[in-house]
Structures are given as structure tokens and as C-alpha cells.
Amino acid sequence: MLLWAPAFAAPAYHPGFACPRPDGSDVLATAVCADPVMAKAELDLEKVFYAHRAQDGAGVYPAIKAQAIAYATAVRIACAIPAEGTPGAVLPSGADSCYVKVTEQHAGEWAKSLSGVYAQEAARDIDLHIALQQKLINAGYASSPMLEADGIYGEGTRTATKSWQAAYGDDQTGVISDAEVPHIEKLGVSRAVRWASQPPEPSLSSDTNAPPLLRIFQLDMLGIQRPFLEQITGIAKYVNHYAEKITTYTYIIKGCELTAYEQGDQIQGYGLKVTPACSVPLTPFIQNSTPSVAELTMGDMSAALDGSARPVADCLESCGNAADPNIGLMKQGSHAEDYVNIEVYAPIIDETALNAASNWQNALRKHETDDDIVKGKFNCDGRYATEGLHAMRDVGVKEIFVGRGESVIGQDINGQCGQ
């Protein structure tokens, strides 16, 4: 069973039916099983079939099936291929190339009656079609983590797609739109699958040749003493003291702003102002996010965290001018995750973040008074998490905190909830 595979390696094409054929009674089926070029053409037709099944619904399934049978009959006639069960049948010379040509023509013709995201799915290159399916499987969104992509988007793939869309913050259509493709491409391998298939990656904390930020954002850099950290960072530029004996030390490392959170005599967490030049991969902490954090949106982060992060905002109403308010996600680490918390934020200053905050605020106003919104109680019970995630799914990550405890922003938000 496939547990770990390159996401975009060229697949070995197999038709949408079981191979090898048990009795060899159908010369065409036997040929399609043996010839990957013919199998690819068959998959292209199946791709359109399943797009129609999703678009047109269960009520017209008999008609869709009848159309598929009509195409199968037409290709046999056009290519002089014997009917199934013909005794002693052989595939005529040139029938393989004829089958590919006619089947692709049928797929293109049938696709013309698709629209919207269904047309986008049917038009997608088969390699990408299969790779996206494998991405969902590897990331744990399929019903079983030990399935291999086959290019057939049946009910299992539709359910997996809906699960990802819910975690990402999109409408749960079960169909991957062109706009969603790059976000599914960012998915890595789920924690359960990865740990079952390969040993943990070695920490970079002691690799003096690794970039400083990569050395710092490692699990074994939590709980260390500050003098050890400052062998990497140098002396702090700013020091601030907060409640519960928390002190933050802000370092400038090659133009990047890193904040270390010290409690007692141990560093318990790290914050980073994220830019394209100041970024880190998060695989040591969440293990199913392959890109650098600067490449991720809030929706990508939510999907990488299996939809378990809480959408939050430190202020959506009457924020004043003291500081830029933020929207973001908070994930409290479980025992299995060594109690490592993850927070990501974006200040509400650029157009995307402003629109996201406004959209979430408008959704809240349908249910809550302005006074309730000012008090931030929408952060506390999760009742409006779906609306919040949907609003901010395209907002880029601009700040991250990883560690035990909370960031300064997280303390403020949880304080609104009495936590």
C-alpha cells in the first residue's frame, strides 16, 4: 500500500475497472489493462463521466450511465473491435490508436455539457487530476490513509474533497476548482501517515551550517536556556516583561524579527514576523505542511492542521488607533503533540485582510450586537468559526508563534474569553 509518494510523479495509468480481466473474454478490456496509453484515454472519459455524475446528481445517473455505454458501443463500431464475449476475438491492427483517438473525441464532446467547476475538473490534465487525489489521501482527508489515487473521483474522493474544503474554509462542493488547486498542492503528509511510514526527521538545532531560523524553529529548541539561544541569535534588541513572569526577547537576525518567550529560566516559544525572506517550514511542528510559512494562507494553515485551529481576531469593532488589530488562527497542542501551540496572524492593514475582517464582522452582525463584537466573545465558543475561516481563508500569514503557552496576541484574545 502506498504511504509516501512524490505528489507529482508521472502515474502508471490504470483503467477505471479491475485488471487483469478474470476470464479474458473481452479483448478490448484486456488491451486497455495492458496498454497505459489506452488506459489514459479511458481515464479521460471516466473523468468526464464522474464530473457529470457530480454536476447532474443522482437523479439522472441512469441517463449518464446510458451515455457512457453508448460511447463504449460507438468506439467498438468505429474501431472494428469485437463485442465482449466474442469467441477467439483478437484486437484488429490499429485498433489501439483508433481507440485512443475516438475515446478522447468522445470525452471532449461529452465535456461540452459541463459548466463551472465541473468543466474545470473535466478539463484538468489527468496527471494533475490523479496527483490532487493523492494529495488528499496523503494529507489524511480520505477515509483511509492507505489508499492509492486511481483518477476515479467517486464518493470517497468527493467526501475527502469536502473534508478538505471545510478545513480550508471553502464551500463544500466536493469538486476541486481551479482556484483551489494550488492550495491542495501545498498539502503534505498527515502526522499519522508520516509517522507510520518513516522515522522523524533529525533536528537542525545543532547544525551550525543551517540558517539560524531553521535551527531555532525545532521541537528541541523549546525548554532551552536563553544563553544557548543567544549563541545563535546574539544579544536581544528589545526586552519586555509581561504577566505570569513572561519576558520576551526580540532579536534581529539577518533583517528578520524573532521574539523568544521566556518563562522562569526556559525559552517556551518563538514568534516570527513573516516575510518572503523571513520564513521557516513548519514540518517539525505540524508535519503535514511542506511549504515555507510565507507561502501559506490562513486557509492553507487550517487545512494543514486538519481544520482544528480556531479562527480569532483581537479586535473587529471600535479598535482605536493604539495598534493594528489582527485576525488569525489558534491551535492548542494536545498531549500527543507535546502541548505545542501554534498561532498565526495577519494585521488588518492590507486589502485582503481588511475585506476578511469586514466580511466576518458582517456575518457576526447577523447574530450579535456591536457591543458583543467589541467584547470579542465571538472568539470563545466557536459558534462563528466557520464564518471566520471562510472570510480569512485567502489572507496570507504575516506572524507566527510556536511554543508552549501563548503569544502576546494570544494572551489578549484568550483574556477576552476569561482563559
Image (cartoon, grey):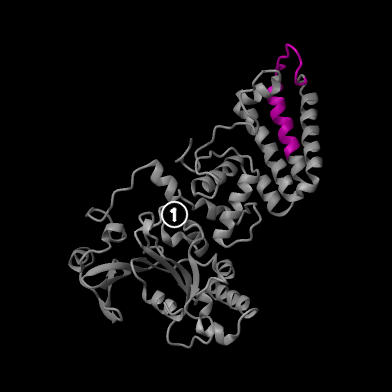
**Which one is in front, 250 or 261?**
261
Residue for badge 1? 289
- The answer to whether residue 281 is visible is no
Q: Name the residue rendered at 57%, 40% in the picture.
A: 127
Residue 65 x %, y %: 77, 38
Query: Is residue 341 rendered magenta in the image?
Result: no
Task: Name which residue type carries label 1.
Answer: Ser
Q: Name the residue rendered at 23%, 66% in the picture.
A: 233
11 versus 396 height, above or below:
above
The magenta stretch spans which residues?
83-107
Residue 78 x %, y %: 79, 25
Instruction: Identify the image quadrant of residue 378.
Output: bottom right
Horizontally, residue 41 falls left or right of residue 348, namely right
**In what quadrant of the picture does the C terminus appear?**
bottom left
Horizontally, residue 408 falls left or right of residue 66, namely left
315 versus 83 height, above or below:
below
| Number of numbered markers | 1
Secondary structure state at the residue bearing disc 1: loop
288 versus 418 height, above or below:
above
Q: Name the residue rendered at 45%, 81% in the picture.
A: 416
